[in-house]
Amino acid sequence: MADTINKDIEADPASAQTDAEEYSSGYVTDTASLTSSINSYVFENGRRYHTYFGTEKNLQPADETEQDRLDLHHESFLILLSKRLHFAPISAPMSILDVTDAYPCASSLGIDLSPIQPHWIPPNCRFEVDDAEADWSYADGSFDLIHICNIAQGIKDYPKLLEQSFRCTQPKRYLCLAELELSINSDDGTHMLPQGEGINKMSKLLADALEKIGRPRLVTAEMLKHGLEKAGYQEMKVETYKQPLGPWAKNKDLKAVGATNLLSGETVTMHMEWLCSPAFWV
């Protein structure tokens, strides 16, 4: 089993009197999207969804609101890692734009299903619209570092993804994985009390829906480690971190993570119509 870094999270008594709206309002950012001939989308329930590689490829919207949510996830990872921007023992930050800014001699490539990247990027950074689940066209040993973050529920064949990553990684170089385990837990068992029934039911229904369309119900550190070993990777280091839901933690960094997760969760609930779609329950 992987060691949990932040084993017990102490609650902040003052958080009970804090209006959660303080943490969930006013989050506005300006983003820009690339225009492209492959820029084809479907609009449902007020949100924009990916279609180029198939409507089933990305369950999340492909719009600016979703980009803001992903920015929140990135910030949560940074806080949890104490501003440590990498897992591998090399100087390579977590965000591709951070990489290219900090290391102008390095060449960085980002992959996405949709052309939604910002206009202004460093000259040593480029993006490709591609499907990570398709057969990779990159030569063996093309990369010094491959970074995969928060895509597990979007991948049907995760072992294949790891195998292709291993083939395309330089010998004695690195693959970094950062995934979320979609489970609701608590240090004191309160998530099993009646007041936790609603969120537990939602979590189970979400897992059931993912399973019906061939996505993993739950991704754990042990599953990822086993997949890495099977793909051929060696000398693996596994770290797990608890993420509070809501700004109740006493520790200021974990309070910020919880507030960020609250914002992210509110964004997700804005497009829960896909979960209620009959396609998930046939």
Image (cartoon, rainbow, N blue to C red):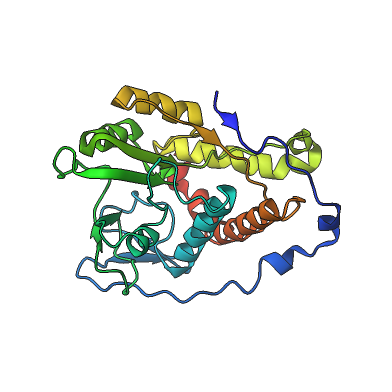
At a point 41% along the width and 37% down the height, the residue shown is: 215
Residue nearest the viewer, comparing 224 with 134: 224
Quadrant position of residue 216: top left
At a point 44% along the width and 42% down the height, the residue shown is: 87
In this rendering, the answer to whether 271 lies above or below 91 is below
So how many labels did they put on this image?
0
Quadrant position of residue 201: top right
Residue 82 located left or right of residue 10? left
Residue 131 on image: x %, y %:
26, 49
Image quadrant holding the C terminus, namely top left
At a point 47% along the width and 41% down the height, the residue shown is: 179
In this rendering, the answer to whether 12 lies above or below 62 is above
Residue 211 located left or right of residue 36? right
Quadrant position of residue 234: top left
Residue nearest the viewer, comparing 71 with 206: 71
In this rendering, the answer to whether 195 lies above or below 256 is above
Residue 150 on image: x %, y %:
45, 47
Residue 33 on image: x %, y %:
34, 72
In this rendering, the answer to whether 175 lies above or below 16 is above
Image quadrant holding the N terminus, namely top right
Residue 62 on image: x %, y %:
39, 62
Residue nearest the viewer, comparing 148 with 52: 148
Residue 167 located left or right of residue 157? left
Residue nearest the viewer, comparing 233 with 264: 233
